[in-house]
Image (cartoon, helix red, strand yellow):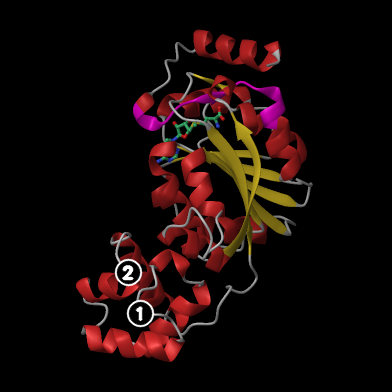
Amino acid sequence: MAESVFQETKWIMNRYHIKANKSLGQNFLIDDNVIKEIVENSHIQKSDFIIEIGPGLGTLTKELLERAGKVICIELDEKMIAILKDRFKLYDNFEVIHQDILKVDLQTVIKQQKEAGQFTQVKIVANLPYYITTPIVMKLLEDKLELETITVMVQKEVAERLTAVPGERNTGAITYSVFYYAEATKIMEVEKQAFIPEPEVTSQVIQLKVRETPKVQIEDEKKMFYVIKNAFTQRRKTLLNALTNTHVFESKEQGLKILKEVGLKENIRPEELSLEQFAEITEKL
Ligand code: SAM
């Protein structure tokens, strides 16, 4: 670990009397190498508009500001807002929104920036607050924002789910959602020692490349995700039982008929299905 980011972070925390707020998921990055990897893998150019979620003390922000045309940070903690405004007052490409990321109308934020600047690509970069990783990732994807990439630090367990391929290991309902909207890759594993305070879990940086068109064509995507969600709430059960118990299938007979039509065996389990097969089942309901 390089001394510099660690010392800088300590200095800022002392100067502003900051104690990390656990309930806000505050684990500040202090590893130069991790910061470098996140920034390099985001391939930031002057024509990019970057949205950073949860900038905290501004460690990543500083690197983003040096490279991007514009950086808008969204931070919930008032104390961080004061630090960020102070720290980056000389940057004319910096802006901060004091709000809960889940409540921000990102569509409007992006539209305004695109109209005002010459930005061609919009990217998300963040060391996410872990207590709301899933809702944030789902918001970024479901809001159908004009995004190029989403490069985020998440806890390793969640990273496994988000980057899994449907039909293979480590899948959950969220795997199918992410796969529908994006192509996910792992960038690096990050040990607890890369943060202060140390989180309880190992982390991973992942990148989602947002697809231009979703992976499958489906009339009612909400209905498909409803089917997938119900299939996975009863994970140990067969797909037939899970979807019958949750009343997605009107009856076992209807379920059996649909499985046959789609060419699936009676005792298939939800995690064995491809996204296309879930789409086919949904179309037949
Ligand atoms: N980016 C900094 C870093 O890497 O050192 C801090 C990352 S820390 C893991 C997560 C940050 O998200 C904290 O600064 C926290 O205050 C902020 N945060 C927590 N909940 C938030 C929310 N709902 N909306 C926006 N920011 C939030």
Left or right placement of residue 213 versus residue 76 in this view: right
Element type at marker 2? loop
Which image quarter is the N terminus in?
top right
x, y percent for residue 138: 45, 57
Residue at which label 1 appears: 266
Q: Is the residue 171 above or below the residue 4 in the image?
A: below
For this rendering, which residue is in front, 222 or 190? 190
**Mark 2–mark 1 contact, CB under 8 Å?**
yes
Residue at figure coordinates x 42%, y 42% from the top left: 99
Q: Residues within 10 Å of mark 1 (few under 14, many from 20)?
A: some
Q: Which residue is at the front of the view, 78 or 41?
A: 41
Residue 147 sits inside the magenta stretch: no
Q: Residue furthest right?
A: 46
Left or right relative to 5: residue 67? right
Q: Quadrant of residue 126?
A: top right
Mark sitting on residue 231:
none
Which of 188 and 112 lies nearest the eye of the viewer? 188
Q: In the rendered structure, which amino acid carries the disc numbered 2? A: Thr
Residue plotted at (53% across, 22% down): 83
SS category of the residue bearing label 1: loop
Image coordinates of residue 152 in percent, x first then y, are: 58, 43
Give the residues drawn in magenta, as a range: 23-35
The image shows residue 85 at horizontal and vertical percentages of 56, 28
Residue tagged 2: 238
Measure the C-alpha gap from mark 2 to mark 1: 8 Å
